[in-house]
Amino acid sequence: MCGSTFTFSIIDGVAQKVFFRSCEKNSFCGLSGTIGFQKGKVKTATTCCSSDSCKPQTPALPRDSTQRVGLNCSSCSTVNSAFCHTNEIIECTGEETKCILQSTIISGIANSKSAVRGCATKNICDFGSQSYDFGDGNKVKTEVMCSNGSINLLPKSMLLTIISLMSAIML
C-alpha cells in the first residue's frame, strides 16, 4: 500500500509539520491518533491507496478535545536521550485513554534521540514500534510502550538491566 503520513507537533511552543510518503501496512491505513504531554501535543494520521503509482490524500489530523477521561499519566519530553522520567502528572483528555512512553532515534545525515511520556490514543499504541529506512541512509526507529494506567513505564532495555541487577544482588 502507498501511504501518506502527516504529523503535527507542538513542543515547548515550537510547531513542526512532517509529511512523508512510504509503503505502509494495510492495517495502518486510515488510522490517526494523538499524544498529549505537559509541554505539547503530537497528532498524526495516515491515508493509503493501492493502485500503481497512486498518491494518497493528505490525511486529516484528529481534532483537539478538552474532555477529561479520568486517567492520569506521567509526563515529560527530552531531546538527546531516548528516555525520560518525571514525577509530573498530566490528566488525559479526549480519546487519549492510554499512558505512553515513546522514544525516537533518527540516524543518517542528522542523528538525534528524543523521548516523550504522556497520554495517547489507542491507535498510537496500536501503531506500536516502527522502523523506517528511507533508502538514502536516513533511518527512523520509534519504540512505543503503552499501558492502561501505569504511569511508570520503563523501556525493555531498562527493565532488563533492572532485572539483571536484582538477580546479581540476590545471588
Image (cartoon, rainbow, N blue to C red):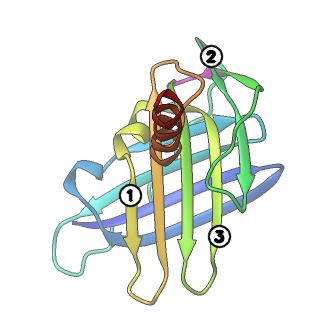
Using the numbered discs, state the Cα–Cα distance from disc 1 to disc 2 in whole angstroms: 30 Å
Q: Residue at x 74, y 32 (%)?
A: 86
Residue extending farthest bottom: 136
Residue assigned mark 2: 67
- Tell me if I can see residue 140 in this picture: yes
Q: Nearer the viewer, residue 108 or 154?
A: 154
Question: Which badge, 1 or 3, comes first in the chain's sequence?
Answer: 3
Q: Residue at x 72, y 62 (%)?
A: 80
Identity of the amino acid at label 2? Answer: Gln
Q: Are marks 1 and 2 in contact (CB under 8 Å)?
A: no
Residue assigned mark 3: 112
Which tag is nearer the camera, tag 1 or tag 2? 1
Indicate yes or no whether the magenta region holds residue 55: no
Q: Report the side of 23 relative to 94 (left or right).
A: left
Q: Are marks 1 and 3 in contact (CB under 8 Å)?
A: no
Identity of the amino acid at label 3? Answer: Ser
Question: Which badge, 3 or 2, comes first in the chain's sequence?
Answer: 2
Using the numbered discs, state the Cα–Cα distance from disc 3 to disc 2 in whole angstroms: 34 Å
On the image, the x and y values in percent for residue 36 come to: 64, 35
Is 106 placed above or below 98 here? below
Q: Nearer the viewer, residue 79 or 155?
A: 155
Query: Magenta residues, as a range?
Result: 92-96
Mark 1 Cα-neighbour bin, 10 Å: few <14, some 14–19, many ≥20:
few
Most prominent secondary structure in the magenta stretch? strand
- SS at circle 3: strand
Q: Residue at x 53, y 44 (%)?
A: 158
- Tell me if I can see residue 57 in this picture: no
